[in-house]
Image (cartoon, helix red, strand yellow):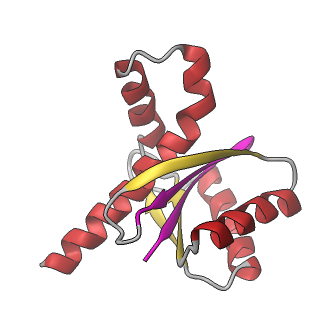
Amino acid sequence: MKTLGIDLGTKTIGVAISDDIGLTAHGIETITRTDLKHDLAKLQKLLDEYKIKKIIVGLPRNMNGSLGKSAQQVFEFIEKLKKAFAIPVDTWDERLSSVEAERLLIHADMSRQKRRKVIDKVAASIILQGYLDYTNKKCSQ
C-alpha cells in the first residue's frame, strides 16, 4: 500500500512517499504553502499521481511526550485532510526528525543553501520511514 508522509510546517510541507510494498520512504517534494486551497490541490495531485492509499502526518511532540501549540495546528490540518480526501490519515511522532535530517545532510557535505531546499522532504522521509519500520515490525511479530 502506497503511503504519503507529510512534515507540516508553517511555510512549507515536506512530502515523501513509500514504495509500492511499504518498505522504504523517499522524499519527493517540498510544497511552498500559500493557502489551504493551494496546499490541498498540490496534495491531491500527488495522491492521484502516486495512487496513495494512506497519509501519515508528523506530529510534533515536546521532548517529554506532551503536545504543544504546533500539535494543535497539525490536528486542525488533519481534519481538513480528512474532509478533502477519502483516505485514512494518521500521525507519527516527529520528534527530532528535522534534527536528524539536518545531521544527514551535513554528513553528506551539502551546503547550507542546498540543505534549506531539501530539509523538509528529508524530514518527511524520516517520519514516514519510522512509521513504515514500526508497522512492518509489528506485522512480522
Look at the image and give the residue range highlighted in magenta: 1-19
User: Is 63 within the magenta?
Assistant: no
Give the left or right position of residue 17, taking residue 21 as reference.
right
Give the left or right position of residue 90, taking residue 23 as reference.
right
Which is more toward the observer, 31 or 63?
A: 31
Which is more toward the observer, 32 or 70?
A: 32
Give the left or right position of residue 115, taking residue 85 as reference.
left
Quarter location, residue 76: bottom right
Where residue 93 sits: x, y (%)? Answer: 43, 57
User: Total of numbered circles in the picture?
Assistant: 0
Answer above or below: position of 121 versus 102.
below
User: Is 17 within the magenta?
Assistant: yes
Answer above or below: position of 40 versus 15.
below
Identify the residue at horizontal 38%, vertical 26% (top origin).
103
Q: Is residue 83 something that shows in the picture?
A: yes
Where residue 108 sits: x, y (%)? Answer: 37, 21
Q: Quadrant of the C terminus?
A: bottom left
Where residue 15 sits: x, y (%)? Answer: 58, 52
Identify the residue at horizontal 56%, vertical 81% (top origin).
88
Secondary structure that dominates the magenta span: strand
Answer above or below: position of 76 versus 1.
above
Which is more toward the observer, 30 or 9?
A: 30
